[in-house]
Amino acid sequence: MLTLDSALEFDPSRDEDFFTALPAYPAVCLIEPKETSAQPLFIRTQDLRRRLQRLLGPLDSSSKRLNLRDFAKSIRYRITASGFEQTFAYYQNARELFPDRYQEMLRIRPPAVLKVNLRNAYPRCYATRKISIASNGAPSGGVYYGPFPSRKAADAFAERALDLFKVRRCQIKIRRDPTFPGCIYSEMKMCLAPCFAGCTKEEYDVEVQRLVAFLETGGASLRENLQAERNQSSEEMDFEKAALLHKKLDKLDDALRGQPELPRRLQDLNAIILQRGRADQSISVYEVRAGKIAEPFELSFAALAGDPRSAEQILRERLEAKQPLATPSVIDQSMTPGAVIPSAARNLSLLGSTSQAELSEHLWLLARWFYSNPRQGEIFFRGNAWPYRKMMRACARLLAPPEDQPQPQSGKPHQNNSPQSGGKRENHS
């Protein structure tokens, strides 16, 4: 946990010494009251000294500004070197200090994800903000894909993706009634129409399997199949079919165009976030495993001068020392088409044990930072292996001082003139 590691007692008669001792850096700060029955105040700010001078300075009778000079007994704070660290530290400490209202303090809203609902005999794909968690801590009831910047963005991508498959979009209960009239999608041959027994259960499961594989691979599975069929048609001189498949590939490109890199199956949401560290020439490394943000560790380049190991070697040791990430496919080729749903459900257990609220909140933190503009720091997703060389080049970029800013003092955090993510408004409770 990113604890509040510094503290100061507040004495109004010696306020000048108090304010002088405060660093003029971004921070999260807890103002503790004199009265034991009163609630402490938890804030985040871009300049701790200036903010507390306003809150704890001499009272101005002509001003309506909040003044806590007679309220405060002491403060506890943590200097933060990046907007991501500030938001993460504020979240962790608010969750511990104010368990009943920390979500309101941070204005947490569950992120939008796509869900392929596997509880239904005839699954469908739709946008949701709720991730169901089973008793073993794994997401239950479906395959989740996200997070997206908004519910609107999730719905838009779902519409484009479902145009490539014949999975149902209706919300009715499927009764397989041959007398049922169906919907416009079945009339346009864009749905297998299980509602009036237009397909067998096995045929529908195969189509769901194709959709899940599409979401799992970011469209690569469908692209490979279409390209293979197109090449085969060309070799067989069936140019009409090859042209049709080429149009489907163009439609696939249109569906994926502009799609951000973050949304993916939650079990596969493994990444490394690099941020400036608090110490001079240091990088804070945040590992994201299955959508959950782990505690950061610091990579100090200043200390590497006397270490025979390279920064890349140290990073490898830290990441590879943990349990290897398992990312098996949802598709099991040895199983019958109708067995795709239990196969997918088993793989959902890879996410590990966590609560529904905690996973949703970590996804919110991740999406809030990733979709912020401007975004500070860099992120690298894990494919077959971690891209260590790219990470090292990113560390060099983050440590390079801006030309228009002075060098930070040794042992103190780098102060960026640009607003931190989430730091444009000073939140307090």
Image: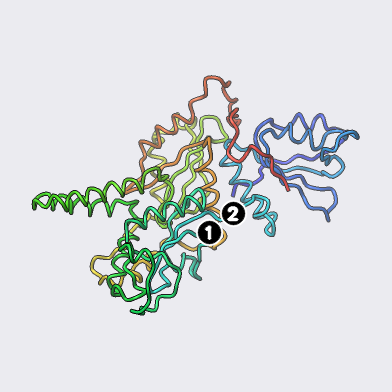
Q: How many marks?
A: 2
Q: Residues within 10 Å of mark 1 (few under 14, many from 20)?
A: some
Q: Nearer the viewer, residue 173 or 309?
A: 173
Which label was assigned to residue 109? 2
For marks 2 and 1, the one nearer the N-term is 2
Q: Write the residue at 48% across / 39% down.
A: 274
In the picture as drawn, the residue positioned furthest to the right comes out as 61
Amino acid type assigned to the residue bearing label 2 in the image: Arg
Q: Write the residue at 38% across / 64% down.
A: 184
Is residue 113 in view? yes
Answer above or below: position of 77 versus 35.
above
- For marks 2 and 1, give the CA distance: 8 Å
Describe the element under mark 1 as helix, strand or loop: loop
- Picture quadrant where residue 98 is located: bottom right
Question: Where is residue 118 drawn, in percent x and y?
Answer: 40, 69
Q: Check if mark 2's residue and mark 1's residue have beta carbons within 8 Å.
A: yes
Q: Nearer the viewer, residue 240 or 134?
A: 240
Is residue 349 in view? no
Q: Write the residue at 13% across / 52% down.
A: 232
Q: Nearer the viewer, residue 305 or 197?
A: 197
Q: Please give left or right for residue 301 compared with residue 340 in the image.
A: right
Q: Residues within 10 Å of mark 2 (few under 14, many from 20)?
A: some
Amino acid type assigned to the residue bearing label 1 in the image: Arg
- Looking at the image, what colour scheme do you see? rainbow
Q: Please give left or right for residue 162 compared with residue 275 in the image.
A: left
- Picture quadrant where residue 81 is located: top right
Describe the element under mark 2 as helix, strand or loop: loop
Question: Where is residue 335 drawn, in percent x and y?
Answer: 25, 70
Which label was assigned to residue 129? 1
Which label was assigned to residue 70? none
